[in-house]
Image (cartoon, rainbow, N blue to C red):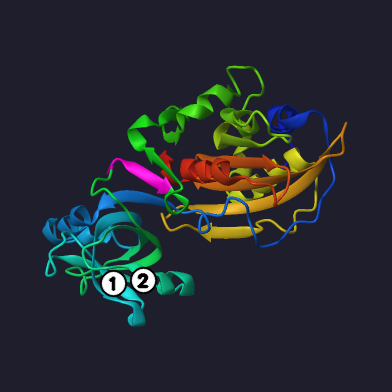
Amino acid sequence: MEKRTDKKRILSFLLIMTTGFLFLSGLGLSKKAVSLDTEGYRVYQNRKASSVINGIKHGGKDDWKAYDDEYFALLGYAQNVKPKNDQFDLSISAMEDSSHINCKVKDDVLANAIVELSAGDTILVYGQLSVTALNKNNPTLYVDSFQKVDSDRIDEDAVSTRNGNNTYKTGDLLERDLHNGKVKYYIPQSWEQVEHNIVAEELGEIEGYQYRLNELNRGAVYAQSLFVCYFEIERFVALNDRSDMTLIEEAILRDITGKENLKDFPLRTVKTYYGTEYKYYQDGYKKAMTGDPYRMEFVFQEIGSEGILVYLYVYNNDTEDQGKIKEEALMVMRLLETQ
């Protein structure tokens, strides 16, 4: 791919805006672990067990396929508790013979906790649902966690992160769009106060937003940002260079990092549980004035042949408590929609 003069368009907002004038340092980073880890920080759809069971049983011929492999937080009632077999049933009512989902536990800590369940307990169970043509009358949920709850109510217009640490009603999230509405994503309301529109604020020419997430925590010492950007192929890439997405992504990385050698790209390629494929790359730099080390994690999502979504997550180190902020960033990625 030929060298172009797009460095100003990309670099001006992705680096200088983040923490001041920066010197890249090429910090040594893991070749496998990623911070925006879709497996480590899953997003669960909140549902009643009865809604899922009825949707599977009474939908169209193949409607059960929409539930297979999805992650849910399911509310129901414990039945047929078998601690020795590391399993229990999640029923639609407290009645012993009601329709149910079979819940299987592999984690030793969770397996030991099953003994605390009693028949009829109202519980919320997080896990991945497995539905096949053979088991659709009694699907299986592979359990990530579960908890007893006092209420038999759950907001089915909501998603939960990190096994229920944070729950968001999807109708309360704020919608943002890119590429003339062909890309839509959703942010927590609190993010609006730290949001910066790249083009509208004349911070750069590439379409997208920066979220200065450390500003949500007034006591935060280090910068922490998530960029969500759309790279339009037709606008930025010469006609003869558009056939290879990987080469285009490498050119974006070279412009941003200033490095010619990208032997570690892609650092990791992930086909997520929700079907989206991401390519990852990591780098590091030190802030010029203070020498504070920062890490950059790039995530590329190809949108057909028209463009590339570029997520850039900037943070200080792996040990800082990113908690809720990182969970929300992964929720933004999970709920993003493309046409």
Hey, which quadrant is residue 137 in on the image? bottom left
Residue 88: assigned label: 1
Residue 322 lies, in percent from the top left, at 62, 45
- The structure residue drawn at horizontal position 59% and vertical position 41%, both measured from the top left corner, is 311
- The structure residue drawn at horizontal position 34% and vertical position 42%, both measured from the top left corner, is 158
267 left or right, relative to 113: right
7 left or right, relative to 36: right
Whole-angstrom CA distance, mark 2 to mark 1, is 8 Å
Helix, strand or loop for disc 2:
helix
Q: Which residue is mark 2?
A: 114
Residue 88 lies, in percent from the top left, at 28, 72
Helix, strand or loop for disc 1:
strand
**Is residue 133 a member of the stretch shown in magenta?**
no
Residue 211: assigned label: none
Mark nearer the viewer, 2 or 1: 2
68 left or right, relative to 260: left
Answer few, some or many: residues within 10 Å of disc 2's Cα (few below 14, many 20 plus, some between 14 and 19). Answer: some
Where, quadrant-wise, is the C terminus in this rendering? top left
- The structure residue drawn at horizontal position 29% and vertical position 50%, both measured from the top left corner, is 150
Whether 166 is drawn above or below 267: the answer is above
Nearest the viewer among 303 and 137 is: 137
Whether 80 is drawn above or below 215: the answer is below
Q: Earlier in the sequence, mark 2 or mark 1?
A: 1
Q: Is residue 118 visible?
A: yes
Answer few, some or many: residues within 10 Å of disc 1's Cα (few below 14, many 20 plus, some between 14 and 19). Answer: many
Check disc 2 and give the amino acid type: Ile
Say if mark 2 contacts mark 1, CB within 8 Å.
yes
Check disc 1 and give the amino acid type: Phe
Hey, which quadrant is residue 135 in on the image? bottom left
Q: Residue furthest bottom?
A: 84
Part of the protein shown in magenta: 155-160
